[in-house]
Amino acid sequence: MLIIGSHVSFTKEKGLLGSLEEALSYGANTFMFYTGAPQNTRRFKIDEKLTQKAYELMKENGIDINNLIVHAPYIVNLANNKEEDKYQFSINFLKEETKRCETLGVKYMVLHPGSSVGLDKDIALSNIINGLNIILKDSNTTILLEIMAGKGTEVGRDFSEIKTIIDGVIYKDKIGVCLDTCHINDAGYDLNDFDKVLNEFDNIIGLKFLKCVHVNDSKNEIGAHKDRHENIGYGTIGFDNLIKIIYHEKLDNIPKILETPYINGIAPYKEEIEMIRNRRFNDKLK
């Protein structure tokens, strides 16, 4: 079954209900959202009545809440503990964020592993492992580590680094992986041969850990380590390669989430989801 959606907004006024309504307007059957602004850690109280209305509307439209994704904000960093207070703040904030996921009934939260920022990579990996073990100890949320493009001092820039983190996490049933097509292209994985990439993922990490796919084309050539998303079919990965990934039999029933750029200030997700469902490229999208 194709489970396809996009990033949507989540506001104080409409909460999960507003996120769902936006997703439905795109023809989606899943979606991803931040529980507040991705650039800061200010959070508002979740309205239980709006959440309940969202549950009812999801049921009416055949949307499984187990396929929804929360994304943690960018500014938390579990990889660097040079300033202990900031490191501890990241841990405490993510503990609270998992509680917000539980309040909303959302199982999965995607997390950027972090940046070493002057620390040795092995120390950075150890910091991430330590933080995750504290966060996950009393949580029912599954944290999905997003594989990164490798810009700057990002950690989690290849399958081996992600495996190292997973190996160190005590709570294996609460850890998983989010694969972003733009990121792994920019990290150096050749998506012209996705079977080879997926086999490498399986051999190093294990496909059982793959719980979400971010579907984005890339503005960059393979191995550029830049992380610049492009609209579906308008980048270097290409429409045909992305369709093969989206419909790959080993990725069946895994949520696919679009994070492509807005076009002239307007979300392109309805048109991109239509392209994906029809398996036909729209060369007039932009």
Image (cartoon, grey):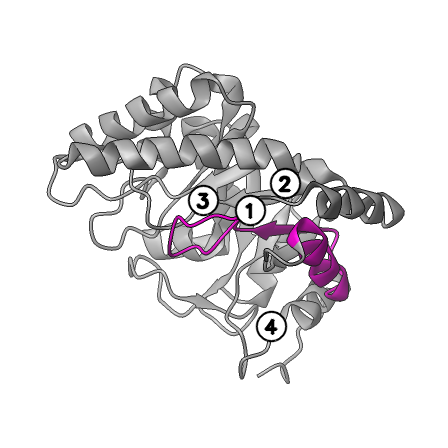
- Give yes or no for contact between labels 1 and 4 (Cβ–Cβ under 8 Å): no
Residue bearing the label numbered 3? 72
Mark 1 vs mark 4, CA separation in Å: 19 Å
Q: What element carries label 1?
A: strand
Residue 266 x, y percent position in the rendering: 59, 78
Q: Residue 251 carries which label?
A: 2
Which image quadrant is residue 79 in? top left
| Tag nearer the camera, 2 or 3 | 3
Which image quadrant is residue 221 in? bottom left
- Give yes or no for contact between labels 2 and 1 (Cβ–Cβ under 8 Å): yes
The residue at 29%/36% (across/down) is: 89
Hey, what amino acid is under mark 4? Ala
| Tag nearer the camera, 4 or 2 | 4
- Give yes or no for contact between labels 2 and 3 (Cβ–Cβ under 8 Å): no
Mark 4 or 3, nearer chain start: 3
Residue bearing the label numbered 1? 213
Give the class, few, some or many, for how many residues have Cα within 10 Å of label 2's Cα (few <14, many ≥20). Answer: some
| Tag nearer the camera, 2 or 1 | 1
Along the horizontal axis of the image, is 20 left or right of 197? right
Hey, what amino acid is under mark 1? Val
Along the horizontal axis of the image, is 24 left or right of 168? right
Q: Quadrant of the C terminus?
A: bottom right
Hey, what amino acid is under mark 2? Leu
Instruction: Give the magenta part as a residue range.
Output: 15-44
Q: What element carries label 2?
A: helix
Q: What element carries label 3?
A: loop
